[in-house]
């Protein structure tokens, strides 16, 4: 079923001699169709924003997506990778039968929203056994809405293209949920999301602080690999007034943090590849005058080179063991990958730049952006098939992107004026890929 606004836009284009509906779909046709669904896209984004759900708990969101895809006449598979949704749209035109995928992530974060929006979240969820506020503080509500908008535009044009478009609505992008073995991308891959039909290439986007409507990415390593690091230090509890009668894990903790910071700053060449190693949480002790028996530290490691990452992990584990031993303590050191390196296929990256320029406009696309140390599990899809992931600037009007609230902030918000740009980028990426000889 084609929505009235989209149908009106398509009929208007069909009646225009300059835009006769033969041959490849033009960028002007896509722009008109994206405008035709924009009111729905905005409404969908606001509804999803007001009803966020944590990773692998996106039951309402998944049902929301599935219902709308079915109304567009798109084949739908639900429960793919627990709460993921896959939509399959088969073109009825003649030509090559290629298969391309577009992806959006659905999960929210355990964040108390402070945007002041009239549709701000007041939702709660369960995280690590506690009830927590939940908010779309990373923009995944906009991602879902834009991909649904693209699906509606493309469903209204299926007689204009050959081949197949697969829409992946992914759960649990924000790291592996506590107590779970895998995050959402790997769960969907294991469930066969890329196999039936067999996908040849994949594209995805993420809203970030940036000039509204601009698109930026880079070939090869774009977003860092992300590892979670856990360290448990074991000492011997004693009175705070008699530290020599125990083994002081608080002192060990301080030295471990300084050692890790020094390792990163003094053993990695920052001119070759960015590296960040941060200890972010410390849990130790219950009383001001008791040195505890145990301290638990957790942090994140962000890297762009596999061999360098492995070498740094080995050095860090050895150094932590040595620091602990010097105090008479012991250490347990473990590393768990949250996301692999987002590696944009070089050939596909070069091909995509003019396509994204069709979507965003001249001078609005930077295909040579610097790398960023934030991470994305879109990387696992790229480990299976060629893909490109790009960023869409979405800072509110009148705000300097350099000082705008970043993703994961309680104040993070998406400029809704960029939603049509994202819809156009999705649509044109899919269409132009299917048109390739």
Image (cartoon, helix red, strand yellow):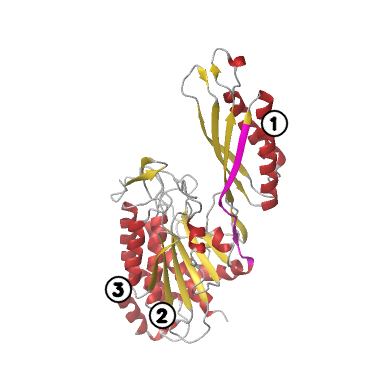
Q: Look at the picture and state if 327 lies above or below 352.
A: above
Asked if one can make out residue 124 in the rendered structure from this viewpoint, the answer is: yes
Quadrant of the image for the N terminus?
A: bottom left
Q: Nearer the viewer, mark 3 or mark 1?
A: 1
**Relative side of 214 to 6, left or right:** right
Q: Can you tell which quarter of the image residue 158 is in?
A: bottom left
Residue on which disc 2 sits: 158
Q: Look at the picture and state if 354 lies above or below 295.
A: below
**Relative side of 308 to 162, left or right:** right
Q: Which of the pair 219/190 is nearer the observer?
A: 190
Q: Which of the pair 66/43 is nearer the observer?
A: 66
Q: Residues within 10 Å of mark 3 (few under 14, many from 20)?
A: some
Asked if one can make out residue 418 in the rendered structure from this viewpoint, the answer is: no
Secondary structure of residue under mark 2 = helix
**Image coordinates for residue 9, horizontal then vertical, percent:** 33, 76
Q: Look at the picture and state if 81 lies above or below 329.
A: below
Residue found 47% across the figure and 77% down from its top: 164
Residue on which disc 1 sits: 322
In the rendered structure, does residue 337 fall within the stretch colored magenta? yes
Residue on which disc 3 sits: 3
Chain part drawn in magenta: 331-346
**Image coordinates for residue 8, horizontal then vertical, percent:** 30, 77
**Image coordinates for residue 122, horizontal then vertical, percent:** 30, 46
């Amino acid at each position: 079923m084609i929505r009235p606004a989209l149908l009106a836009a398509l009929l208007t284009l069909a009646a225009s001699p300059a835009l006769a509906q033969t041959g490849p779909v033009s960028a002007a046709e896509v722009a008109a169709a994206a405008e035709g669904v924009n009111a729905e896209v905005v409404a969908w984004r606001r509804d999803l924003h007001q009803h966020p759900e944590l990773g692998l708990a996106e039951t309402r969101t998944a049902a929301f997506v599935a219902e709308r895809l079915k109304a567009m006449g798109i084949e739908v598979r639900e429960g793919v990778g627990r709460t993921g949704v896959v939509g399959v749209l088969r073109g009825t035109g003649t030509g090559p039968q290629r298969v391309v995928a577009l992806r959006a992530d659905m999960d929210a974060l355990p964040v108390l929203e402070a945007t002041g929006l009239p549709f701000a979240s007041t939702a709660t969820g369960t995280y690590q056994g506690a009830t927590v506020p939940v908010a779309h503080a990373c923009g995944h509500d906009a991602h879902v809405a834009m991909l649904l908008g693209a699906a509606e535009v493309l469903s209204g044009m299926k007689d204009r293209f050959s081949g197949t478009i697969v829409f992946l609505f992914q759960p649990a992008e924000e790291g592996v949920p506590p107590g779970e073995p895998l995050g959402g991308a790997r769960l969907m891959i294991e469930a066969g999301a890329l196999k039936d039909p067999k996908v040849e290439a994949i594209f995805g986007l993420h809203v970030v602080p940036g000039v509204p409507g601009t698109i930026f990415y880079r070939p090869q390593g774009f977003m860092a690999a992300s590892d979670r690091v856990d360290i448990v230090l074991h000492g011997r509890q004693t009175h705070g007034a008699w530290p020599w009668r125990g083994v002081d894990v608080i002192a060990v903790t301080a030295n471990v943090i300084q050692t890790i910071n020094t390792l990163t700053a003094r053993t990695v060449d920052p001119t070759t590849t960015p590296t960040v190693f941060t200890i972010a949480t410390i849990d130790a002790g219950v009383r001001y005058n008791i040195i505890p028996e145990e301290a638990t530290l957790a942090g994140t490691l962000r890297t762009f080179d596999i061999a360098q990452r492995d070498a740094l992990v080995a050095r860090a584990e050895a150094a932590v063991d040595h620091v602990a031993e010097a105090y008479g303590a012991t250490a347990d050191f473990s590393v768990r990958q949250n996301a692999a390196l987002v590696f944009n296929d070089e050939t596909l990256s070069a091909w995509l730049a003019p396509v994204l320029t069709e979507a965003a406009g001249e001078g609005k696309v930077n295909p040579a952006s610097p790398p960023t140390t934030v991470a994305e599990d879109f990387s696992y899809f790229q480990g299976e098939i060629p893909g490109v992931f790009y960023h869409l600037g979405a800072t509110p009007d009148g705000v300097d992107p350099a000082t705008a609230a970043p993703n994961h902030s309680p104040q993070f918000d998406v400029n809704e004026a960029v939603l049509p740009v994202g819809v156009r980028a999705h649509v044109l990426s899919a269409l132009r890929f299917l048109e390739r000889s």
